Image: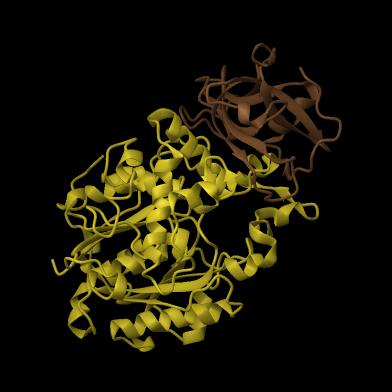
Chain colours: A yellow, B brown
Amino acid sequence: MNTEVNEIIERRVVVSGAGQSEIGRRLHRDPLELTVDACLAAIEDAGLTTHDIDGIGTYPGPMDTPSGFSGAGVTDVQDALRLELGWYTSGIEQPGQLGSVVNACLAVASGLATHVLCFRSVYEGSAQGDKGRAGVMPGGGGSGNFRAPGYMQWTLPFAAPSAAIWIAMMAQRHFYEFGTTREQLAWIAINARKNAALNPKAIYRDPMSLDDYFAARMITTPFCLFDCDAPCDGATAVIVSRADTAVDLRKPPIQVEAVGTAMRGRPSWDQWDDLTTMACRDAGAQLWTRTELQPSDVQLAEMYDGFSFITMAWLEAMGFCGRGESGPFVEGGTRIARDGELPLNTHGGQLSAGRLHGYGFLHEACVQLRGEAGERQLPGDPEVGVAAAGGGPIAGCLLLTRSR
Amino acid sequence: MAEAPVAPPFRILPRVTERNSPFWTGGAEGELRIQRCQDCHEFLHPPAVICPVCHSKRLEFEVVSGRATVFTFSVNYQQWMPGPELPYVVAIVALDDAAPVRLTTNIVNCDPESVEIGMPVQVIFEQHDDVWIPLFEPSAAQAAP
């Protein structure tokens, strides 16, 4: 493989704005309205108007099922705001949720667009209503004559419809090979909850102790309730802009330093070569080939926690600890705390701040790097951060810097 | 081989196609069938249209022993949908004589909390309409008290 790269093309790009809608467990609001709220907030944050936006990138695009998974697609937002687009994309076959932002970076770098609106919108809280997670399971929970097609045929017949089970099996294998424990895993959840206490938009903000964690009901071993993220309603948006437009922007932008999108293993939750790792292994390795920065330069890590173990996999994938060493790394919570060597999921992650599905991490990284995180702002004026999303055979990540 | 339960639980069934049919119907003859390249002898799963190793299209389903080893598992306590009685075990098993194929399945006919990584298991089939779902139970030697 030719590893010679003439230009790290994503460096032509900045994140110029970030915005969020109202976020709640069940808002029962029109998801398109939430989406537009987030988009307008991000556009305003960048100091732009809707007339400046000439691109849209989103994940996963319009999807009817599972209910609540996608609040709006490209055309919904384009028409709602009457945007004139030079480029757009959506889809679920991307390097994770943030793959849509990477696509936007490439579109801007290549000149197809100047200011791309990227968003992710969910209303899973309202959609599942009082039926719990069963209310939004694929296949309608087996109603009618539904038969599982494609990859679902390998999971649904075995009553394994949820990624909770698939990721739990990866965690179990990690426990087996490396001696990782539930007590170590717990610190991902406890750390998130501690951080969420400082985030007024977080879903769950009450303190959580190790005892609380162990008292929670088991979902699927080794995951208890607190290892699983909290479905919610809300939308997040960022604006990806050409770096040379920075002079026109309202605030100092965040530089995209490098991205990672690789998936070298089989696209499968059970045939993947090493089930103690995920696609983040490949995306993370690729990211570090595109920058002179090192893992030790990173001052904040906002990394996917759809289930707690996914964050452990990202910690290893990004080289913040050695392979198999994420358990000891997070144990006790000291290293990953706000005042630790690697502040992790400083908004509370999806575990406590709500399952905004990937974009919440990017939003938080931008807010922290700009010093606009309010009560939860990290001390020390951080300049380098990671935003990463995706679990299992799906992953995408960005390395972001302020004023380099 | 142990008999399938008298009243099997509700299961969402797979959409049977020409490509996957030998896998989902092999249980009618008590056979676990895995596709194999007839040129380079690689076992292929899920069923493919071309051997990804040598690009041969001479692919046939072969009967394998049904012996496997628990590669990883999870004891599920959550009611996601109508299904087996809680808790039930979802596992990924590695087929002993069809490496590198793994199957996601349920481990049945044992105490869910007794399942361990490395445990030897054996296929059994649970019939629903036109498909035979391959499940696994502790192998005879393992199950003996």
Residue A205 falls left or right of residue B85? left
A23 relative position to A396: left or right: right
Query: Which quadrant of the view contains residue A297?
Result: bottom left
From this view, report whether residue A122 is shown above or below residue A144.
Answer: below
Instruction: Kindly identify the residue that appears in the image at 46 percent across and 28 percent down.
Output: B53
Q: Is residue B20 above or below residue A139?
A: above
Horizontal relation, residue A126 to residue A107: left or right: right
Q: Residue furthest right?
A: B6
Residue A146's place in the image compared with A363, above or below, is above
Q: Position of residue A380 (x, y in %)?
A: 16, 65
Q: Nearer the viewer, residue B47 or A185?
A: A185
Whole-percent x and y of residue A300? 26, 59
The residue that appears at 42% across and 42% down in the rendered structure is A183
Q: Is residue A267 visible?
A: yes
Q: Position of residue A333 (x, y in %)?
A: 32, 50
- Quadrant placement of the N terminus of chain B: top right
Q: For the point 40% across and 31% down, which residue is it?
A: A179
* Up/down of B143 relative to B46, above or below: above
